[in-house]
Image: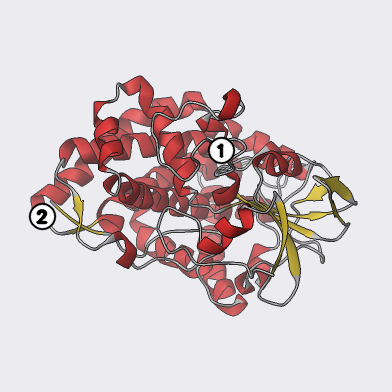
Amino acid sequence: MLSYPQDRTCPYQPSPGYRELGRSGPLHKVRLWDGSTIWMVTGHAAGRRLLADPRLSADRSRPDFPVVLPRFEAPIFKPIAIIGFDPPVHDVHRRMLAPDFSLKHVREMRDEVVELTGRLVDDMLRKGPPAELVEDFALPIPSMVISQLLGVPYEDHVFFEEKTVGLLQAKDAAGAEAAGQALWDYLDELISAKERTPGGGEGVLGRLAGRIDDRDLTREDLLRIALALLIGGHDTTSQMIALGVVTLLEHPDQLAAWRAAPPEALPAAVDELLRMVSVTDVSGVRVATEDIEIDGEVVRAGEGVLVSSSMTNRDPEVYEDPYTFDIHRAAGRGGAASGRQHLTFGFGIHQCLGQNLARMELEVAFSTLFDRIPGLRLATPAGELPARSGGTMQGVHRLPVEW
């Protein structure tokens, strides 16, 4: 039985072990770090069905919820707002946040993101090569954007970026809890300050601070929402920018096609990058509340389910040549799944709230970077980049580039 997780050997491809698993059907049992087992879903159709099935719970406070990595034993993860609650609480909180992440609001933010991205490239060019692209470009873009959106002071970015990495990459529960508690205490003080400010001050947190203690929002609710949005709003997107750059540089024909593409073709190109890189690696972790029959298997009540985005996004039943990166990929076999129907953002009611924002940031970041620095190249071979270990979030610790 394959153990989970497996480290990637290529920054933008799943591990060889997962690839072998995907050849033998859509559902598989894999062994976790503590000896327990979980269903790993590699089939696209099965993944969509299960992520939309109300008989699977996302509530991480349940005693039978699977702990896929040691760090997830930390109390800070039980539960996580938005992705870690079931209805009706999940639905109430998501409705509160929907206007801030709507397509309309994201479009209104685009010009500011274009300006920010241009300034970061200006700074890189002024300093000259080499550059460390995570620190100089990939991380500041989403950190600044989510700070402004939430009303978090960007001058604190070093603190919350370091603690986020400490939380998401901790080797054990104690390390995760220490980093998570530091973020919790920081956000607690910030929300207290907003409560003392007439009108709540700027950003989503300022707006919601005025609603604390009403029927739908407790102080702990808001703290968990703030923590989830701050972490998810910068770490995932920064790593997607970094690994997206690696993927484009490793495929010069596709980079040339990107540069030649009209603006209206870039959203589809971004989705192909999202499909290919699958930076989150996991579309969702759930626990069955009832027996579920699917594709000749029975997921028993109390058993865990992990939907692999990196593998469902490479299902040969859906995507022709699924391991090939093609920014002109328009649809799956027989038109069954467009490039946008990848599972990188999940599926169903827990589909990523910030996907519109992430797509916009990625499109602006890649276009600006390669327009302004056409000679950009990796300063370290892709296979030698310092990569994060296997798990729920893929990425690189550093990305040296030159031009």
Quadrant holding the N terminus: bottom right
Task: Give the residue drawn at x 48%, y 70%.
Answer: 166
**Residue hosting label 1:** 342
* Amino acid at circle 2: Lys
Instruction: Return the mark for residue 233.
Output: none
Q: Secondary structure at mark 1?
A: loop
* Amino acid at circle 1: His
**Residue hosting label 2:** 127
Name the spot of residue 208 as percent of width and height, x first.
60, 42
Q: In the displayed structure, would residue 354 be above or below residue 398? A: above
Name the spot of residue 20 as percent of width and height, x first.
58, 59
Disc 2 from disc 1: Cα separation: 38 Å
Q: Secondary structure at mark 2?
A: helix
Q: In this rendering, would 146 be left or right of 365?
A: right
Name the spot of residue 382 as percent of width and height, x first.
30, 60
Q: Nearer the viewer, residue 382 or 373?
A: 382
